[in-house]
Amino acid sequence: MVIPLKKTTKEGEPYRRRAEIEQVLDELDQLAPDQLVHSLTSTQEAVPFEVYIYYLRHSEIRLAAKHLPPIFIAFYSRLEAALRKTVSDAWLDHAVAIREEIAERVVEMIAKDRNSHEDNMYYWETNFNHALANLRKDALRKLGPARETDPLINSEPLTHESGDGHDIRPEVDIAACDFINPNPSKLDDAAFRLRLTDAINDLPDNERRAVGLLLQGMQIESQDPEVMTIAKALGCTDRTVRNRLQRANQNLRVVLQAEDI
Amino acid sequence: MNTTSHESKSDVLHAFSTEANPDADTLARYLKRHPQYSESLIDLSIELFSAQSFDEAPAEAVPSDNAQRAWSTFQSMLRPEDPASTAPSAMVNPLSSLDKQQFKELARELNVNRLFLSLLRDNAIQVATIPRQFLASLAELLNIPIEGLQRVLVAPTTISEGVRYKASGKPGSGDKITFEEALTHSHLSDEQQSVLREMKDL
C-alpha cells in the first residue's frame, strides 16, 4: 500500500499528492522490488521526481540495501541534469557551486526525513518542481551575484526550457512581443525567453501580479459580474491594472535592453 | 459567494497546488471561494505557473562520479539501522588489504601492471570513466559485487605524492584522473593499453 502523506489538514485528513502522482505510485506499488528498480532507472520514460522522493525518503518501504543505490543514482543524475539547465554556467560565475549547494541540500533533507519520519518533505512529493524552484531561489539569494549587479538571476523563470524549444506558453510570446518589437527573432531563443520571464518575476509585487495574471489568461475587465478579472482579483480598477501593466512593460524593456539580449 | 472559512490558509494553498490544471479558471474558483487568501493564492499561482518542469526524459544513462559520491554521503547520513546506511567497513578498498604477492598476482590476472592497479587502489581514477567490463572483471577477481566496488572507488583519492604529479591537472585533494590518463601514465605496454581501450563503453 502506498504510504499516505502524514501532514494533515485542520480536519485531520492527510494532505493528498497530485492525482497523477498517486496513480504512478499505485502502479509501482504492485511491482516486485527488482521490477520497481527497473522502472525507476529506465531511461526510456521519465518517472516524475515526486516518485523518487517517495521511494528515497520512506525507510518504511523496506527496500533492500541493494535496491536503493540504483534508485538514488538515477534520481541524482536527473537532478543534476535539471539543475544544469536552470542554474546555467552561461549566466552565472558560481553556477557549479550553486548547483552543488542545491543538490547537497536535497540529499541532506531526504536523509533527515528518512531518519526522523517527521514528514518534513511532504511538499516535495506533491509538487517537486515548485519545491525545487524555491530551493533554487534560496540558493541564488545566498550564493548568487548581488542583486543590484544582476537583477535577473534572483528570481524564477516563468517558462521552462524544453529540449526542442517549443514548449513555451503562447501567452508569454504574446506578452514578449511588446518588449522585443525591434528584434522578434529573439523569441526563438530559449535562453532569451528564460531571461524575459526571470525579469517578469523580478518586478514589484503589484506589477508582477498584474502581468502574472494576464499571462495565465485572466481578463483585465469584463461586463459579466460573475467573471473573475484581474481588476477584481487585485481589488483595483481596470484602469489601475492597465497602468501597472504599462509600468511593467517599461520596466521590462529597460532591464532587457540593459542586458543587451 | 460565501467563504468556507474553516479551511486554513495552508490547506487552501496545498489544495490549489495539487490541482491538475491550476489555470486562470481554477484560480478564479479559488479566489471566489477564499477571498481572504487572495494575495497568497495569486502569488502561488504565478509561482506554479513559472516553476520549470524538471521532468524531462533522462538525458544520460551513465551516472556521474558526483552521483556516486552523493550516494556515499547520503548513506553516511542515515541511521546505522537503516539497511541503506554505510557500514564503516564498506568503504575500505579491498585492494589495499592485499599483500604484495596477491597484488602482483591480481595485476597479472587483469593484464595490467602494479602501477596501474595502485591507481585503482588509491581511488585515483574517475569511476565513471572506467569501462564496466573492466570493473566487472576486477569485482569478480576480488569476489565483491560490482556496485560495492564502484562505491569504494568513488571515495576521495588517497593518491601518493609520487604519482600525483603525473596527472595532467593541477594536483589537489580530490583530483582524479580519467581511465585514459591512467592508461597513458602507467607505463603499460602498447598491447596492454589497446586491450584496455577496447573495453571502453560505447
Image: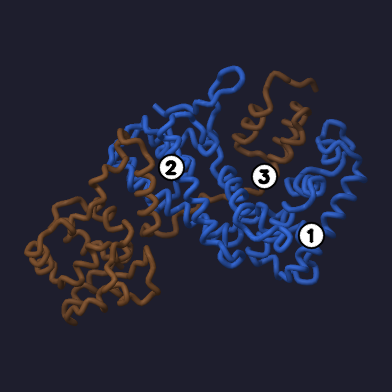
Q: Which residue is mark 3?
A: B47
B10 or B97: which is nearer to us? B97
| Chain coloured brown | B
Do pointers 2 and 1 mark residues of a single chain? Answer: yes
Can you tell which quarter of the image residue A154 is in? bottom right
With respect to residue A59, does B149 lie above or below? below
Q: Given contact means CB atoms under 8 Å apart, are the residues at marks 1 and 3 in contact?
A: no
Residue drawn where x is 65% and y is 29% of the image:
B10
Q: Which residue is mark 1?
A: A252
SS for callout 1:
helix
Rounded to the nearest angstrom, the CA distance separating label 1 from label 3 is: 18 Å
Quadrant in the picture for the N terminus of chain B: top right
Q: Given contact means CB atoms under 8 Å apart, are the residues at marks 2 and 1 in contact?
A: no
Q: Residue B16, percent across and down?
A: 65, 33
Do pointers 1 and 3 mark residues of a single chain? Answer: no
A226 or B86: which is nearer to us? B86
Q: Amino acid at mark 1?
A: Leu
Q: Residue B114, percent across and down?
A: 15, 70
Residue drawn where x is 70% and y is 35% of the image:
B26
Q: Residue B179, percent across and down?
A: 29, 70
Q: Which residue is mark 2?
A: A52
In the rendered structure, the answer to whether residue B148 lies left or right of residue B126 reads left
Chain ID for label 1? A
Do pointers 3 and 2 mark residues of a single chain? Answer: no
Q: Amino acid at mark 3?
A: Glu
Q: Amino acid at mark 2?
A: Tyr
